[in-house]
Image (cartoon, grey):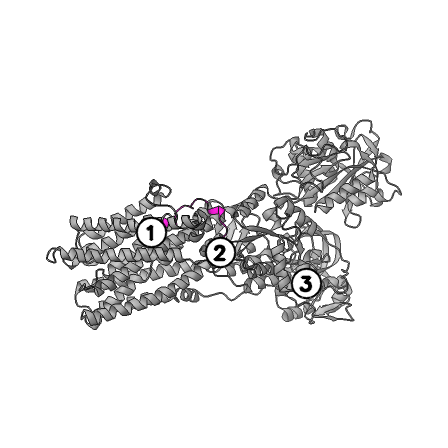
C-alpha cells in the first residue's frame, strides 16, 4: 500500500459492494473495510480465514503479484562514477596538457627533454587519478540506504495454507495469505487483522509512535468527507505493517499488500527517488572552475600570441609556453585541499561523536537555519519513564536521569504537574498550599513509602527489568516497565519483592476492560499486620476506569491509612496529567477474604468490575512519559543563540508533542501550537509554507509529511537539517539539506540515508557540528585566498614575463606543477586546520547564496596576485641587471621559483586571520601545524634547489647564492607587508563605518 500522501486527494469512488472507497481502483483503504469486505476485495474464498489459501492459488498469486521483496534500484556502475569525476573542464585542460607533453616526450631526441616531459605527464596523471579516487569513494549512500531497508524485512512467515500452519519464506507471501503473528515476530507484510489476543505492535521505527499500539479488529469509522487514506498509520488499529514488531500478545491477519506496495515499500520508493542535493560549496566550486577555465583559456591564447609574434618563437615552442601558462593556472591541488578541509573537520567531528558520511556536507552545517528533529529517541530518551507519582495529598517528582539507587530520586514537588507551571521543572518550594502529607514539599520520601506506594505497579506486572535496570534485556510493556525501573532506582529490590509476594491468582490485562489485577498473600512491611486470613488485591489500569471502581483512597499514599474517595480531586488530576500528553496509570488495592479467591485459578474481569459497587482503594497515579534528554534542553538554547531554529516532527499525538515541546523550549510565545499531519494534508502549498514558519511542533506526521515540511521550509529559503532514527525518517533525511541520523538507537536505513550520524545519539552534538560547519566555510575561503593568488601568479608570471621582454618563461612546467601541489598540500593545509575564530557561534547562519569568493576575498586575491606576480617577474629582471654571465637562465629560474614559493608563505601567514592582524604573537599560537607545514615546505624547497640532478635535470635550475636568497627574503617581506597593509586599511575603514559586527558580516 503506497504512502497515503502519495495519493491525490479527492480521487475516490463509491464501491457499493465493499461499502467504502478506493483510489482509482488501485489501492483500497483496508482499515475502513470489514473483514468480509477485505476478503472479497482480495478475491479470496469465504473460508480463507479458517483454511488459508491453497498451495496452487498461492503460486498463481505469486506469479500475479510478484515476490514479497523490495525492488532494487539500478546501481551506478564504477565507470559512470569515474566519468562523473572526470567530466570537468579543468580536468580536460590537464588531459590536453598531458597529451601534448607525452607527444613532445615521444618526439624529443634529447634525453633530458624526454625525461622532463615524461615526469610532467606522470605528475598530471597522478593528480587526476588521486582526485578521481577521492570523489568516487564518496558516492553510493542511496544504494546502501535501499539495501538497509531490505535487511529490515522478515525472512520467514507462519502462514495457514491448505488448512495447515507452516513456515515459509517471507518472500513467498502473497495478498490473501493468512499469517499467524506471535510475540517478538517481525511482521512480514502489510496485514489486515482478523483476530487479536491482547495484541500490541511496536511501530516507532515506521511511525515515530513511542509506545506499543494496541490492536483490534473492528472496522474504522471515518467521518463523512474525510479521506480515509489520510488517517495516520498509528491510528489504523486494525492494521499491522511490514518490518514492525509484535511487542505483546498474538494475532492472526490476512495479507493485503506485499513488496513495494507495503508502507515500507513506499518509503523505499521515496528513498530511491529522492534526489540528493548538491551543497553550496560544490556548486560554487564548479562555478569558480568555469570562470577559471575562461581565464586560463584567455591567458593561454595571449601567451601563445606573445611568444609567437613578439618573441619570434616557433609554433611548437609557442604552444609549449602557452601550455605552461595553462598548467600554471589550473588549480590541480584545489580539489585535494578542499577535501583536506572536509577531512580534517570530519576527523574533529568524529572525536566529538559526529560521524560525517559525505565530506562536502560538512559545510552545509554552517548555513543551517532550522533543524527538524524526530522526537522519539532523538530529543527524548526513547525510554518510557515514571516522571511523577500523585497521591491524595501530594505529588512526587521522579528524577528520571538519576543513576544512583536511592529514594532521593523522588522529591515531593506539588507544583511540578500543574498546568500553570512548567512541567517537571518547577521550583519544589513554589507551591506549598496543597493538602498535608507524610513528607514536606521539597523532601524525599522514605524507601518504605515508595515500596508500599508502588507495590501495585511492581507486583501486578509480568515485566522483567534488564540488567542494572537498563532498557536492554527488558521484557514487557514499556509503560509497566517504567514503574519497575523507578522502583529499582529508588533502591527497591524488585525481584526479591516479587518472590516474597508471589501471585496467587490474576485477571490478565485486556484492552476491552483496560486493567490487570493480581492477588497476593499480604506482607506485613508493605500491607500492615492482622491480615492472616486475607488476600491483597492489586489492580492497575486506565485511571478513568479505576476511579469508577474506587470507594476509598490511601491517605497521602500510605496504604494502610484510608479515607473516603475524593472523586472530584482525582478526576481533576487525571485530566491535568492527560492534557499534558502523559500516559497515566492508576494503582489501586483492596483486601478480600481468602474464601473469595480460588488460589492458582484464572479470574475473569468480573472479579474486579462485577461487584455492583465501588470497592477499591486508590493509592496513586503514575504519570509516565518518554522524557526529553536533559542535554537537549541546553543544546536547543545554544542553537537558538546561534540563530538556528529547532522544530520537532513526530508521529505521537498532538498533546504529547506539545508537552514535550514546552519542556524543550520549542513551544513559546512566538511558536504557540502544533500542526498535525492530517491538517497538513488538507493545506495548499502556500498554507503549508505559512504553517511551517509559524510552528515548531508537528504531530501525527507521516513519512511524506516530513518531506513536505522539509520542502516547504526550503521553499521559504530555509537551509534545513533533519534528524531522525527510524525508517520513517529516511526519505526526509535524504531530502533535507543536511540529514542527521542516530548511531546507537537509529536504524540502518536512517543511517545510510543520512549525511551525518550522531554516535552518541546526542542532539547536543549537533551544536558542535554546526560550529565545525561554520569553521569549514571560513577555512575554505582562507584556502582559496592562499591557493588562488599562487596559481594566478604562476600563470601571470609566464604571461607578463614574456610581455615585458623576458626571452623565455621565468618558470618551467615542472616547477609550476610542483608549486601547485606542494603549496596546496602544505601551506593550504595550514588554513584547512585553522581553529574557529572567536565569536563564530554568536553569528547568524551563513546567508543562503553567500558567495564563496565575495568582494572582500576577491579584492584580497587581486592584491595577492598582483603583488606576488610583480615580485616574481621583478626578481628576474633585477637578477638580470646583475650580469647575465653570472646568472644564467637556470639561476633566473631558481630565483623566480623560490620568490614564488616563499612569497606563498607570506600569503599563508596573512590569511590565517581574517579580521585580526598577523603582526602579532598570535601568529605563533593556536595552530601547531602551521609551523610544521612551513618547516616541511622550506626543507623541500631547499632540497629541490640544492640536491644535484634533482635541481638541474628535473627542475631545470641551478643552486642559489647569497644574493639570490637576499632578493627572495626581501620580496617575501614585501608580500607579507602588502597583504597586512591591505587588511589593516580595510578593517580600519569598516570600523569607522559600522564596527566589528559589520566586519564579521562582510567576512562571513
- Residue under label 3, please give it: 682
Q: Secondary structure at mark 1?
A: helix
The magenta span reads 828-846
Magenta stretch: residue 839 in it?
A: yes
Q: CA distance from mark 2 to mark 3?
A: 32 Å
**Front in this rendered view, residue 145 or 393:** 393
- Residue under label 1, please give it: 982
Relative to residue 226, is residue 787 drawn left or right? left
Q: Secondary structure at mark 3?
A: loop
Relative to residue 49, is residue 971 drawn left or right? left
Magenta stretch: residue 61 in it?
A: no
Labels 1 & 3 near each other (Cβ < 8 A)? no
Tell me residue 335's x, y (percent).
38, 58
Residue 919, compared with residue 527, is above or below; it is below
Q: Earlier in the sequence, mark 2 or mark 3?
A: 3
Mark 3 Cα shell of 10 Å, populated few (<14), some (14-19), many (≥20): some
**Residue 500 appearing in the image:** no
Q: CA distance from mark 1 to mark 2?
A: 25 Å
**Residue 773 appearing in the image:** yes
Amino acid at each position: 500500500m503506497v504512502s497515503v500522501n502519495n495519493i491525490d486527494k479527492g480521487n475516490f469512488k463509491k464501491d457499493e459492494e465493499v461499502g467504502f472507497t478506493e483510489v482509482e481502483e488501485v489501492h483500497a483503504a483496508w482499515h475502513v473495510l470489514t473483514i468480509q469486505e477485505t476478503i472479497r476485495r482480495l478475491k479470496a474464498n469465504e473460508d480463507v480465514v479458517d483454511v488459508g489459501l491453497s498451495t496452487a492459488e498461492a503460486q498463481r498469486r505469486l506469479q500475479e503479484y510478484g515476490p514479497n521483496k523490495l525492488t532494487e534500484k539500478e546501481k551506478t556502475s564504477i565507470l559512470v562514477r569515474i566519468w562523473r569525476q572526470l567530466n570537468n573542464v579543468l580536468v580536460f585542460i590537464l588531459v590536453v596538457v598531458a597529451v601534448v607533453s607525452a607527444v613532445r616526450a615521444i618526439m624529443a631526441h634529447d634525453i633530458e627533454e624526454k625525461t622532463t616531459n615524461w615526469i610532467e605527464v606522470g605528475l598530471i596523471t597522478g593528480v587526476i587519478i588521486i582526485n578521481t579516487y577521492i570523489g568516487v569513494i564518496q558516492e553510493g549512500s542511496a544504494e546502501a540506504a535501499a539495501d538497509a531497508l531490505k535487511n529490515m524485512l522478515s525472512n520467514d512467515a507462519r502462514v495457514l495454507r491448505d488448512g495447515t500452519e507452516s513456515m515459509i519464506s517471507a518472500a513467498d507471501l502473497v495478498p490473501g495469505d493468512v499469517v499467524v503473528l506471535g510475540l517478538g515476530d517481525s511482521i512480514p507484510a502489510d496485514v489486515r487483522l482478523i483476530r487479536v489476543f491482547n495484541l500490541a505492535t511496536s511501530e516507532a521505527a515506521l511511525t515515530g509512535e513511542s509506545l506499543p499500539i494496541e490492536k483490534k479488529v473492528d472496522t474504522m469509522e471515518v467521518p463523512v468527507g474525510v479521506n480515509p487514506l489520510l488517517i495516520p498509520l498509528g491510528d489504523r488499529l486494525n492494521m499491522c505493517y511490514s518490518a514492525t514488531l509484535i511487542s505483546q500478545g498474538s494475532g492472526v491477519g490476512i495479507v493485503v499488500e506485499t513488496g513495494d506496495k507495503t508502507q515500507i515499500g513506499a518509503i523505499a520508493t521515496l528513498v530511491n527517488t529522492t534526489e540528493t542535493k548538491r551543497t553550496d560549496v560544490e556548486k560554487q566550486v564548479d562555478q569558480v572552475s568555469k570562470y577559471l577555465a575562461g581565464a586560463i583559456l584567455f591567458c593561454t591564447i595571449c601567451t601563445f600570441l606573445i611568444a609567437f609574434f613578439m618573441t619570434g618563437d616557433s609554433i611548437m615552442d609557442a604552444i609549449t609556453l602557452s601550455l605552461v601558462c595553462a598548467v600554471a593556472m589550473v588549480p590541480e591541488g584545489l580539489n585535494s585541499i578542499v577535501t583536506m578541509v572536509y577531512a580534517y573537520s570530519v576527523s574533529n567531528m568524529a572525536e566529538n561523536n559526529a560521524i560525517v558520511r559525505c565530506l562536502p556536507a560538512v559545510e552545509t552545517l554552517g548555513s543551517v537555519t532550522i533543524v527538524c528533529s524526530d522526537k522519539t529517541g532523538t530529543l527524548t530518551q526513547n525510554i518510557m519513564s515514571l516522571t511523577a507519582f500523585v497521591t491524595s495529598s501530594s505529588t512526587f517528582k521522579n528524577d528520571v536521569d538519576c543513576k544512583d539507587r536511592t529514594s532521593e530520586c523522588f522529591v515531593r514537588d506539588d507544583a511540578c504537574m500543574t498546568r500553570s507551571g512548567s512541567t517537571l521543572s518547577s521550583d519544589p518550594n513554589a507551591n506549598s498550599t496543597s493538602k498535608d502529607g507524610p513528607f514536606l514539599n521539597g523532601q524525599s520520601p522514605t524507601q518504605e513509602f515508595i515500596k508500599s506506594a508502588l507495590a501495585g505497579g511492581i507486583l501486578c506486572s509480568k515485566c522483567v527489568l534488564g540488567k542494572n535496570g537498563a532498557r536492554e534485556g527488558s521484557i514487557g510493556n514499556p509503560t509497566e516497565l517504567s514503574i519497575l525501573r523507578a522502583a529499582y532506582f529508588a533502591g527497591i529490590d524488585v525481584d526479591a519483592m516479587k518472590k516474597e509476594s508471589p501471585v496467587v491468582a490474576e485477571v490478565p490485562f485486556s484492552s476491552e476492560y483496560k486493567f490487570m489485577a493480581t492477588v497476593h498473600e499480604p506482607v506485613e512491611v508493605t500491607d500492615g499486620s492482622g491480615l492472616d486470613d486475607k488476600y491483597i488485591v492489586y489492580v492497575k489500569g486506565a485511571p478513568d476506569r479505576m476511579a469508577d471502581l474506587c470507594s476509598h483512597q490511601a491517605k497521602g499514599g500510605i496504604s494502610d491509612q484510608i479515607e473516603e474517595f475524593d472523586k472530584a480531586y482525582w478526576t481533576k488530576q487525571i485530566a491535568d496529567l492527560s492534557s499534558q500528553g502523559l500516559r497515566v496509570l492508576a494503582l489501586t488495592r483492596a483486601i478480600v477474604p481468602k474464601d473469595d479467591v480460588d488460589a492458582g485459578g484464572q479470574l475473569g474481569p468480573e472479579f474486579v468490575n462485577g461487584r455492583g459497587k465501588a470497592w477499591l482503594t486508590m493509592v496513586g497515579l503514575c504519570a509516565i512519559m518518554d522524557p526529553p534528554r536533559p542535554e537537549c534542553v541546553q543544546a536547543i538554547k545554544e542553537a537558538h543563540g546561534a540563530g538556528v531554529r529547532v522544530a520537532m516532527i513526530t508521529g505521537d499525538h498532538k498533546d504529547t508533542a506539545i508537552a514535550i515541546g514546552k519542556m524543550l523550549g520549542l513551544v513559546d510565545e512566538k511558536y504557540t501550537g502544533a500542526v498535525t499531519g492530517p491538517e497538513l494534508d488538507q493545506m495548499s502549498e502556500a498554507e503549508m509554507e505559512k504553517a511551517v514558519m509559524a510552528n515548531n511542533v508537528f504531530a501525527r506526521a507521516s513519512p511524506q509529511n516530513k518531506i513536505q515540511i522539509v520542502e516547504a521550509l526550503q521553499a521559504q529559503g530555509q537551509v534545513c537539517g533533519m534528524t531522525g532514527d527510524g525508517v520513517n525518517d529516511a526519505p526526509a533525511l535524504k531530502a533535507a539539506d543536511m540529514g542527521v541520523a542516530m548511531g546507537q538507537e537509529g536504524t540502518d536505513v536512517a543511517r545510510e540515508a543520512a549525511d551525518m550520524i550522531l554516535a552518541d545519539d546526542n542532539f547536543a552534538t549537533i551544536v558542535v557540528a554546526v560550529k565545525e560547519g561554520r569553521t569549514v566555510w571560513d577555512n575554505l575561503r582562507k584556502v582559496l585566498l592562499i591557493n588562488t593568488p599562487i596559481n594566478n601568479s604562476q600563470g601571470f608570471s609566464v604571461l607578463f614575463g614574456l610581455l615585458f621582454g623576458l626571452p623565455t618563461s621565468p618558470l618551467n612546467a615542472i616547477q609550476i606543477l610542483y608549486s601547485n601541489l606542494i603549496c596546496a598540500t602544505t601551506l593550504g593545509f595550514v588554513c584547512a586546520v585553522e581553529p574557529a575564530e572567536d565569536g563564530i557561534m554568536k553569528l547568524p547562519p551563513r546567508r543562503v547564496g553567500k558567495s564563496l569568493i565575495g568582494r572582500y576575498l576577491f579584492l584580497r586575491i587581486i592584491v595577492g596576485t598582483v603583488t606576488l606576480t610583480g615580485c616574481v617577474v621583478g626578481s628576474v629582471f633585477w637578477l638580470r641587471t646583475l650580469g647575465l654571465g653570472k646568472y644564467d637562465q637556470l639561476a633566473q629560474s631558481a630565483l623566480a621559483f623560490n620568490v614564488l614559493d616563499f612569497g606563498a608563505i607570506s600569503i599563508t601567514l596573512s590569511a590565517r586571520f581574517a579580521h585580526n592582524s598577523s603582526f602579532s604573537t598570535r601568529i605563533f599560537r593556536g595552530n601547531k601545524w602551521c609551523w610544521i607545514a612551513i618547516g616541511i615546505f622550506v626543507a623541500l624547497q631547499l632540497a629541490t634547489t640544492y640536491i644535484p640532478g634533482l635541481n638541474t635535470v628535473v627542475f631545470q635550475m641551478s643552486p642559489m647564492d647569497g644574493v639570490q636568497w637576499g632578493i627572495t627574503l626581501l620580496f617575501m617581506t614585501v608580500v607579507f607587508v602588502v597583504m597586512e597593509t591591505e587588511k589593516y586599511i580595510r578593517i580600519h575603514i569598516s570600523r569607522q563605518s559600522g564596527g566589528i559586527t559589520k566586519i564579521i558580516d562582510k567576512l562571513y
